[in-house]
Amino acid sequence: MAEHLVGARSDNTTRKYFSAFQKWEAFICSEGGNAIPAEPIHVAVYITSLLKEGASLSVIQSAIYAVKWAHGVRGLPDPTDNAFVKNLLESAKRRPSKAVKGRDKISSDEIIQLCEKYDGSEDLLVLRDLAYIVISFAGFLRFNEMQSLRGSDICFYDDHMSLQLNKSKTDQHRKGSTVVLSRGESSACPLRVLKNYMEKAGINVGSDQFIFRPVFCTKGARSLVRMNKKLSYTRARETVVARLKEVSCKPNLGLHSLRAGGASAAAKSALPDRLWKRHGRWRSEKAKDGYVEESLEHLLSTQPPVLCVLVVGQAVPKVNILCITV
């Protein structure tokens, strides 16, 4: 029963709550109190200490939700359903905070330039990085979705390919989703790049092997590790960002720059919002719009080219038209 109760939340959410609960437990035990069942006043004191330390709103919310979650799975009264705790949370929301700067977006021209630079390369590490970059950009994929791709999740067709995502951040009920990518004409064609990498790496379509795995070098040749092991976030970020910096001078690059760049490119192409929202598997309009970087041309197009102001003459009963170009 305990396993099923914990499974009510996603694995990432459970890990986040458990980590935050451990911090609460360490604090209250050092003060001589109980973590479970907790007294509402003790939770309020803990939130107050976090506020004094300058903790962010995200940290404070995680602490409150973790205590709420731990009591909920045990069927105990919720100590966070208290006026002190609620008011402290509202106080944290009203504190001025530093502006969050998102990752810089990668453009399709930069990705094409990178693929042309390594066109004809047989280096497995280069091919893996290019495949990761192109597929993540074209499919608006998150790192966890890329990391979990297996050979059995890939299907190639004449004019497109499909990716089966069995687990996603917004797919809370694990229904799965399918992402389709069309064949392109440039060197950054998703089908061409991924096929080339999989053939070089010896990964068969339909196999249980992870597509993106660590690479090791022996006797001057590179190959994937024999163990069916996922590529780690740290290594993926290190190698992918290094590749992107070869063609981009943007300072704030990360793995999410690919998903954000792909969404921005789709928005600029005047595709219906419904289509690329579905392609990116966003659940809300606000989340989707947060990924888009509007171009200067689009911003200027929202303003009328000429504003006409009517000026009525006083001495002569006539109307003069003054045109102001904006």
Image: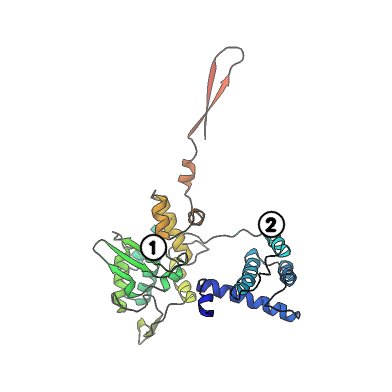
Residue 244 location, quadrant? bottom left
Mark 2–mark 1 CB contact (< 8 Å): no
Which numbered dot is residue 139?
Answer: 1
Of all residues, the one furthest to the left in this rendering is: 158
Q: CA distance from mark 2 to mark 1?
A: 37 Å
Query: Of circles 2 and 1, which is in front?
Result: 2
Residue 181 location, quadrant? bottom left
Residue 34: give x, y in percent of width and height.
Answer: 71, 79
319 displayed left or right of 93: left
Residue 46 location, quadrant? bottom right
Q: Is residue 9 above or below residue 257?
A: below
Q: What secondary structure is found at the residue carrying circle 2?
A: helix
Of all residues, the one furthest to the bottom in this rendering is: 219
101 displayed left or right of 193: right
Report the residue marked by disc 2. 94
Coloration of the structure image: rainbow
- Return the residue nearer the eye: 247 or 76: 76
- Return the residue nearer the eye: 208 or 312: 208
Residue 1: give x, y in percent of width and height.
Answer: 52, 79
